[in-house]
Structure formats: C-alpha cells, structure tokens
Image: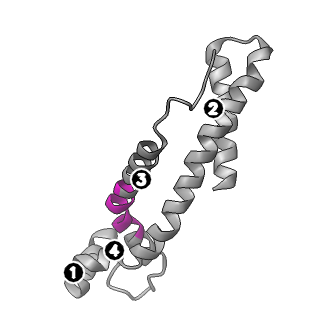
Amino acid sequence: MEKSTQGLNKTKFYAVGAGIFSGITVALYPISVVKTRLQVVSKNSTERNAFSVIRGLLKAEGIPGLYRCFSTVITGAIPARVIFLTALETTKVAAFSMVEPLKVSEPTQAAIANGLAGLTASLLS
C-alpha cells in the first residue's frame, strides 16, 4: 500500500482546510461565548440559561456581542490548524511505511497509521 502526498495540491489543501475550519469556528463561536458567560454567572444573575444569555447579549451588544474576542481566537487557531494538517499528512505517510512490514490487514494498517498521525499532529499543534 503506497501512500504519498506528492499528488496533493498543498496550496488548495491548506486554503480549503483552513477555510473549512474557519467556517466551522465562525458558526460555533457564539456557543463558546454563551458557555463562557454561563460559567461565570453569579447566583443572583438574571442570566441563568443559554437563552437568557443570548437575549441579554443581543439586547446589549447585538450580533457583535456573540463574536467578542473572535479575532484573537482565530489568529491563534489558523496557525495551529496549519501545523496540525502538515503534521498529520507528513506523519501519516511515514506511519504507513512503518506499519507495512507488520503484515497486518489494510484496515489495521490504516487504523494504526492514522492513529499515530492524529496523535502526533495533536501533540504538535
């Protein structure tokens, strides 16, 4: 089983990968803001559930309130994602060549190689 990143269009890979990741981050970021607000709520606060936090944020700050500090988060997240994707693809190729001599089934080789690649990429990013 020969695995290689030679045919991979790296520019497109990183642009699409970072773009998809950024899109998901944009979509899910308001949930993180609401969760953080709920974690620091005091006992006598009127914001005791997610819906009251959202209403309060929208009333006080509008849509931008749901994206408070987003630029800081995305500034750190994009380089981390590039490091993750680079480490994942590089390690996956090396891991496949390492597990090939074990003479196990292809699904087992893929599981081991992908697991090692994911572990390494997570540690590095």
Number of the front mark, 1 or 2: 2
Say the numbered circle drawn on residue 4: none
Give the structural element (helix, strand or loop) at label 2.
Answer: helix
Q: Amino acid at mark 4?
A: Tyr
Q: Is residue 97 left or right of residue 41?
A: right
Q: Point out the tag, 1 or 2, that comes first from the N-terminus.
A: 1
In contact (CB < 8 Å): disc 2 and disc 4: no
Query: Which comes sooner in the sequence, label 3 or label 2?
Result: 3
Q: Amino acid at mark 1?
A: Gly
Q: Which residues are magenta?
A: 23-32
Please tell me how crowded label 3 is: few (under 14), some (14-19), or many (20+) other residues with Cα within 10 Å.
some
Kind of element beneath mark 4? helix
Observer-nearest of 110 and 51: 110
Asked if residue 27 is among those painted magenta in the image, a careful observer would answer yes
Whole-number angstrom distance, CA of label 2 to CA of label 4: 34 Å
Residue in the image at 41% along x and 78% along y: 69
Badge nearest the viewer, 2 or 4? 2
| Residue mark closest to the camera, 4 vs 3 | 3
| Residue ID for mark 2 | 114
Q: Residue furthest right?
A: 102
Q: Earlier in the sequence, mark 1 or mark 4?
A: 1
**Residue under pointer 4:** 67
Query: What is the three-letter code of the residue carrying label 2?
Result: Asn
Look at mark 3 in the image and give the residue it sits on. 21
Quadrant of the rendered structure where residue 62 is?
A: bottom left
CB of mark 1 within 8 Å of CB of mark 4? no
Residue 62 numbered mark, or none: 1
Q: Where residue 14 sits in the image (x, y, percent)?
A: 46, 48
